[in-house]
Image (cartoon, rainbow, N blue to C red):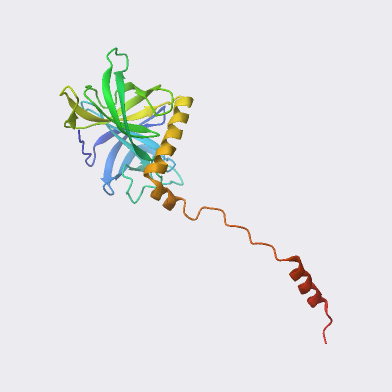
Amino acid sequence: MTIQLEKNDTVRLAIGATRRENARVKRWVDNGCVCLSFSGNIALRPGTKVQLEIPNTNPRAFYYMQAVECLEKEKTELYLSRNTNSQFDQRRRSWRVPYAAQTVIQKKGGQHLADAEFTNISMEAAYLLTTESVSVGEEVSLRLVLPEYPEHTVTARVMRLSDTALDRDVNGKERYGMLVCFEKLQRLAKRHLTYFMWQQIRKTHLRHLQLVFAGTARKPRKAPEAPAKIVAEVDKRAQPLD
């Protein structure tokens, strides 16, 4: 499902767990950065996560964005970005690695377990293939099975669904792509996912890691001069002038 925001469209923002704001689209700055206007004042730190909801859509449609301008004081405008290549993007996004594993998903409050399959994963989200019918914004639980680690049941929220089927399962049922965002990972699950991510990053993004951390190593200290040389120089300076 693709929703295009136009000038003067009304949107609703969710900032953190409690703050809700209404805003209006003022203009698009580039392909991924939008300027919003408010009736009041607002100021956010760069990188602050903002969930932008488009009202009156069925199913509910969201943009997951971030604040990209550091404001010295509150203003009636706010810039949000959703593209990693945007000129306004000031925060590195989460590493994503390939991850193939079978799992099951369950809607919140439901009893039915539906088969699904991971295709990639990050510390914040995962992309799956599933035959289950879900809505954008719906909360689901899924089993996180990482090689060499215990199984965890995690809660996630559906961020995006593919418009068309991407493939079929072994029974011939059409499977659709589903992007989910993890919510409140338990400490042990987060620790195991962190270990797994770094193992995979070293395998799949080694060259990228070398570029990111190039030149960050501590420079070796200059070796002290030999004591004999130091003494010789001191003695030379101590000689009287002719």
Q: Residue at x 37, y 28 (%)?
A: 182
Q: Position of residue 213 (x, y in %)?
A: 47, 51
Answer with the quarter of the image where residue 21 lies. top left
Between 232 and 133, the one lying in front of the other is 232
Question: How many numbered circles does the render carry?
Answer: 0
- Check the image and report above or below for 231 versus 184: below
Q: Would residue 140 be seen by someone viewing this image from the given angle?
A: yes
Between 122 and 229, the one lying in front of the other is 229
Q: Which residue is situated farthest in the front direction here?
A: 148
Q: Residue at x 49, y 56 (%)?
A: 215
Q: Which residue is situated farthest in the right direction here?
A: 240
Q: Which residue is situated farthest in the bottom direction here?
A: 242
Between 130 and 146, the one lying in front of the other is 146
Horizontal side, residue 81 vs residue 175: left or right? right
Answer with the quarter of the image where residue 35 lies. top left
- Check the image and report above or below for 162 versus 46: above
Q: Would residue 75 be seen by someone viewing this image from the given angle?
A: no
Quarter of the image that includes the C terminus: bottom right
Quarter of the image that includes the N terminus: top left
Answer with the quarter of the image where residue 230 lies. bottom right
Q: Residue at x 42, y 48 (%)?
A: 209
Q: Position of residue 100 (x, y in %)?
A: 31, 32
Q: Which residue is situated farthest in the top direction here?
A: 111
Q: Position of residue 14 (x, y in %)?
A: 36, 31
Horizontal side, residue 161 vs residue 89: left or right? left
Q: Residue at x 41, y 31 (%)?
A: 16
Q: Position of residue 50 (x, y in %)?
A: 36, 35
